[in-house]
Image (cartoon, grey):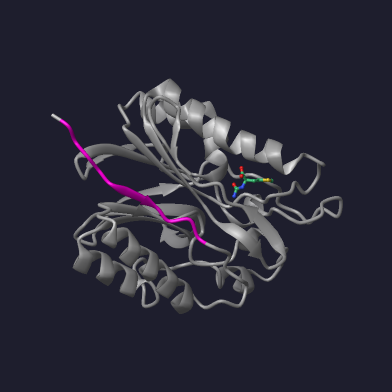
Amino acid sequence: MSRIITVGAAQLGPIQRNDSRADVVERLCELMQKAHARSCDLVVFPELALTTFFPRWYMEDQDEVDTWFERTMPNNETQPLFNLATKLGIGFHLGYAELTQEDNETHRYNTAILVDKTGEIIAKYRKVHLPGHSEYDSNLSYQHLEKRYFEVGNLGFPVHRTMGGILGMCICNDRRWPETYRVMGLQGVEMVLLGYNTPAIGARTAESPHLRMFHNHITMQSGAYQNSTWVIGVAKAGNEDDHVLMGGSVIIAPTGEIVAQ
Ligand code: CDT
């Protein structure tokens, strides 16, 4: 029996530092409307889809850092997206910075959620492979401070039986590590949802944009092929606060072939 999930890879253009959450959510809603018009069951948004990629900025003031985080989900700003999803009967995947209180302690994660067609959050993933560094590095042409602002995710790589399939999630740099896909593959994953923010130009090396895009795709294609799973890789793209993100979103079949780009 065939089981079909129609998925929209909702690549986002840049989000500037001063863009409000409300404006960004409006853009997400427009993309969701388009996905619905094209009969999607599920729309996948990128990593940190509500803000600029703030780990490129060095900040010492924790109050300032925390302005980039969501304390609840949904919240006032994101509720319209949940409302629209429920109205349209479409699921979605969304990346954002999560601030949470657990065991009487504050924790901050680079997080993605999976929301079903009734608007209910049915799964959460917290990024495990945090790239970059935790202190200001003057040798770099820009900073990548995920290790400063986030803790390593504590939820592992579970899979979820939902929407007629077995779905898993990972975030950006996770895609470069075979164990990410393998842990989900051993649980029978059929579709990996993956958002990313990858600079078009390296901060340290003179790697060509072509090589960076090659590595972007080869890691996702090999993960798909070796684990016989679909991979939906969704980027942010374009000039964000004078830093160019590479884009290159893809839908990859279990054969490892890119079927949409
Ligand atoms: N967001 C993210 O994980 N980006 C990384 C680039 C890190 S460069 C220090 C990536 O793997 O694309």
Across the whole image, how many numbered discs are drawn on residues?
Answer: 0
Residue sitting nearer the eye, 17 or 4: 4
* Rendered location of residue 204, percent (x, y): 81, 45
The residue drawn where x is 68% and y is 68% is 241
The residue drawn where x is 43% and y is 68% is 71
Residue sitting nearer the eye, 150 or 185: 185
* Rendered location of residue 85, percent (x, y): 26, 64
Q: Vertically, is 92 above or below 226? A: below
- Which region is colored magenta? 2-12
Instruction: Say which quarter of the image contains residue 4.
Output: top left
* Rendered location of residue 202, percent (x, y): 75, 46
The residue drawn where x is 35% and y is 23% is 186
Left or right: where 239 falls relative to 122:
right
Residue 5 falls within the magenta-colored stretch: yes
Residue 162 falls within the magenta-colored stretch: no
Is there any visible trace of residue 26 in the rendered image? Answer: yes
Left or right: where 226 falls relative to 81:
right
Instruction: Say which quarter of the image contains residue 219.
Output: top right
